[in-house]
Each structure stands twice: as C-alpha cells, then as structure tokens.
C-alpha cells in the first residue's frame, strides 16, 4: 500500500511536466549558446515557450484532477527558479547588464530559501506563491524569451527590459519580505 501511495505521489502528470521542463533546460542552453542564425534563436525561444506553457498547464491539471502532491509543491517552483536562472545566465553571456538581474534574483531566492527553512523548522510555511511573485515570474519569462527570439534587438531595449525585470523582482522581493517578516505575516501553521 505504501508503494502505491508513493508512486501516486510522484508519478503525476503535473510532476512529470515539471521534470520535462527541467530536461528542456540543457537542450535550450546548448542551442542558445551555440546559435549563430536567427532560426537557431527561434528554436531556443520556442523551447522556452513550451517550457512556460507546460508550467501553466501543470498547475491547472493538478487542481482540476486533484493531483496536487507534496513533491509537486516543491518541484514546480523549483523548476521555475532553475528555468529563470538558466535563461538569465545564458542571456547574460550576450547581454552583461542582465548579470544585475541575475544577482537580484539570487538574493531574492536565497532570502526565500533561508526564511522558508526557518519557518519549516517551526512548523510554518507560506500557503503558496504571492501574487507579486506570480506576476514577476510572468514578466521575467515573457521579457527573457523575447530577448532569445530577437537576438538583434537594440541595446537600449535590452536596458529597458533589464530595468523592468529588476523593478518586478524588487516588488516581488519586498512582498516576500513583508510576508515573512512584516507586521501582518502570511506564514501559517502547516496542516497535518
């Protein structure tokens, strides 16, 4: 009986989609970093677009068909973070200004990881992603995929995109600081 529950917890469609997203990352990185022609950038951008679509679909499937699992609650946001990190890291090879975006992303994620662990040890956690985090993720994916798809973009637009991404990351970061440490924290007891 334990083995059946174990398999049911791990081998859900949403979890498999999250794993698929993670498997796409080395393919994307290889194609993007070796691209010299517009069609190669189009392929790399299409891979990331597929990744984003599966991210949207896996959550809907999980809720609609009651496939929400503890592993999925960890795997889905982890796949998001690793995808964002990979996208920004690869793009920063061509657009060094994105290293500032990458640094801010890392600071935000390390903060969330540390406070998340501290709260888990106390039997508490945030009930889910904050709206500011969801909006930030969407903005990052759209803007970064645009940079992949348009490799000859005017450098001024790259600066605008980097600044926009940093603004949304900052808003998201502040929202998580307030959720963890603010007067009206959103941290809740973990349900048994």
Image (cartoon, rainbow, N blue to C red):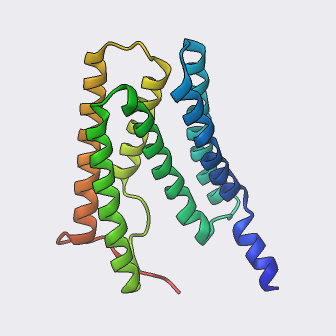
The percent position of residue 167, horizontal first and vertical second, equals 23, 40
Pick whichever, 188 or 147, lies toward us.
147
* Vertical comparison of 33 with 191: above or below: above
In the rendered image, the residue lying farthest to the front is 34
Pick whichever, 61 or 101, lies toward us.
101
Figure quadrant of residue 138? top left
Pick whichever, 149 or 167, lies toward us.
149
Q: Is residue 16 left or right of residue 103?
A: right
* Vertical comparison of 173 with 50: above or below: below
Image point (31%, 72%), residue name: 115
Q: Is residue 9 left or right of residue 130?
A: right
Pick whichever, 169 or 188, lies toward us.
169
Residue 152: tell me if it is visible.
yes
* Vertical comparison of 63 with 156: above or below: below
Q: Is residue 78 left or right of residue 159?
A: right
Image point (29%, 63%), residue name: 111
Image point (66%, 58%), residue name: 15
Figure quadrant of residue 95? top left
Residue 188: tell me if it is visible.
no
The percent position of residue 163, horizontal first and vertical second, equals 24, 32
Please identify the quadrant where the N terminus is shown: bottom right
* Vertical comparison of 152 with 107: above or below: above
Count of numbered labels shown in the rendering? 0
In the rendered image, the residue lying farthest to the left is 183
The percent position of residue 120, horizontal first and vertical second, equals 40, 80
Q: Is residue 16 left or right of residue 97?
A: right
Image point (55%, 21%), residue name: 35
Figure quadrant of residue 184? bottom left
The percent position of residue 61, horizontal first and vertical second, equals 67, 53
């Amino acid at each position: 009986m334990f083995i059946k529950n174990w398999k049911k917890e791990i081998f859900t469609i949403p979890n498999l989609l999250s794993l698929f997203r993670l498997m796409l990352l080395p393919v994307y990185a290889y194609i993007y970093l070796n691209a010299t022609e517009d069609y190669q950038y189009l392929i790399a951008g299409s891979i990331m677009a597929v990744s984003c679509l599966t991210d949207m679909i896996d959550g809907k499937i999980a809720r609609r068909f009651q496939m929400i699992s503890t592993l999925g609650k960890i795997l889905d946001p982890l796949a998001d973070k690793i995808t964002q990190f990979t996208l920004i890291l690869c793009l920063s090879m061509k657009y060094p200004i994105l290293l500032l975006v990458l640094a801010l992303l890392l600071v935000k994620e390390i903060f969330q990881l540390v406070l998340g662990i501290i709260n888990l040890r106390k039997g508490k956690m945030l009930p889910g992603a904050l709206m500011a985090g969801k909006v930030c993720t969407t903005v990052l994916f759209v803007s970064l995929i645009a940079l992949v798809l348009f490799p000859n973009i005017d450098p001024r637009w790259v600066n605008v995109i980097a600044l926009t991404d940093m603004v949304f990351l900052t808003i998201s970061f502040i929202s998580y600081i307030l959720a963890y440490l603010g007067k009206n924290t959103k941290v809740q007891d973990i349900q048994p």
